[in-house]
Amino acid sequence: EALKLLKDCSQFDLAILGRIHPIKQHMLFLQICSLLGQQCQGLRAVIIGGYPEPGPYQRQVDAKIEQLRRLGLNIHMTGNIPSAQVFDWLAKTRLLLVTSQDEGFGRMAVEALACCVPVIANPVGGLTEIIQDGQNGYLAQKDAPQSFCDLALGLLQDEALRQKLGAQGRRMAEQRYSLPQIAKQYEALYQQIVQRQ
């Protein structure tokens, strides 16, 4: 039997952030949405970002979204938005999924953590350093929709845990990635360089 999601002030249960491109694996995100939708009534998801250019991938993603909408899933697309609006959209969601095949740094994960939004991510690139498993989110099994689904379901059904991970993520983002902290790190790096000369 499908479970009803606990509704809070958030507008969306799940989000994915970034340009709609094969490397971001939006099709994997939609597969996860489909699995969750079978277990949760009223699942709400948002795709934050737009297509860099039209083409076969756009048609594939659009077709899958329409299929899921016909099955009753609520999937919203923002289209291309100014970077200044990213935090506004993240603030409306409960979880960010990062399904990318690869990420050099994983800025979208830090942006979500700064908004107290836990992250469930593929264990790739810089995401393995940003996401502290069980502290500010989870690292799923790579490209495994059921793993993402199980982890997301656990957080969507446990609001206290979701808020705890979100708060810890916010503290971590402030301690490691705030402008003052980055400035200190650069200053320390420059001092090391000067001392070597």
Image (cartoon, rainbow, N blue to C red):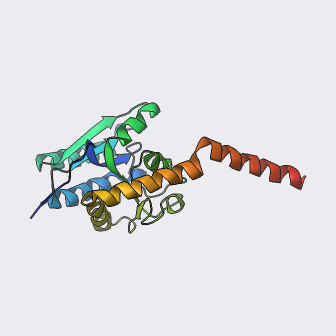
Q: Measured along the vertical axis of the image, is residue 130 above or below residue 89?
A: below
Residue lying farthest to the right in this orientation:
197
- Quadrant containing the N terminus in the rendered view: bottom left
Task: Please state if 182 lies on the left or on the right of 191 as rendered.
Answer: left
Image x and y of residue 152, in percent: 30, 60
Q: 119 or 56, which is in the foreground?
A: 119
Please indicate, yes or no, whether residue 106 appears anywhere in the rendered image.
Answer: no
Q: 156 or 61, which is in the foreground?
A: 156
Q: 105 or 158, which is in the foreground?
A: 158
| Residue drawn at point x = 35 percent, y = 37 percent | 54
Please indicate, yes or no, whether residue 95 appears anywhere in the rendered image.
Answer: yes
Q: Measured along the vertical axis of the image, is residue 16 above or below residue 40?
A: above
Image x and y of residue 60, in percent: 27, 47
Residue lying farthest to the left in this orientation:
1
Task: Please state if 84 lies on the left or on the right of 186 as rendered.
Answer: left
| Residue drawn at point x = 24 percent, y = 60 percent | 157
Residue 138 position by quadrant = bottom left
Image x and y of residue 178, in percent: 58, 44
Image x and y of residue 118, in percent: 39, 54
| Residue drawn at point x = 16 percent, y = 61 percent | 39
Residue 162 position by quadrant = bottom left
| Residue drawn at point x = 64 percent, y = 46 percent | 182
Task: Please state if 87 lies on the left or on the right of 55 as rendered.
Answer: right
- How many numbered callouts? 0
Q: Measured along the vertical axis of the image, is residue 129 above or below residue 24?
A: below
Q: 44 or 29, which is in the foreground?
A: 44
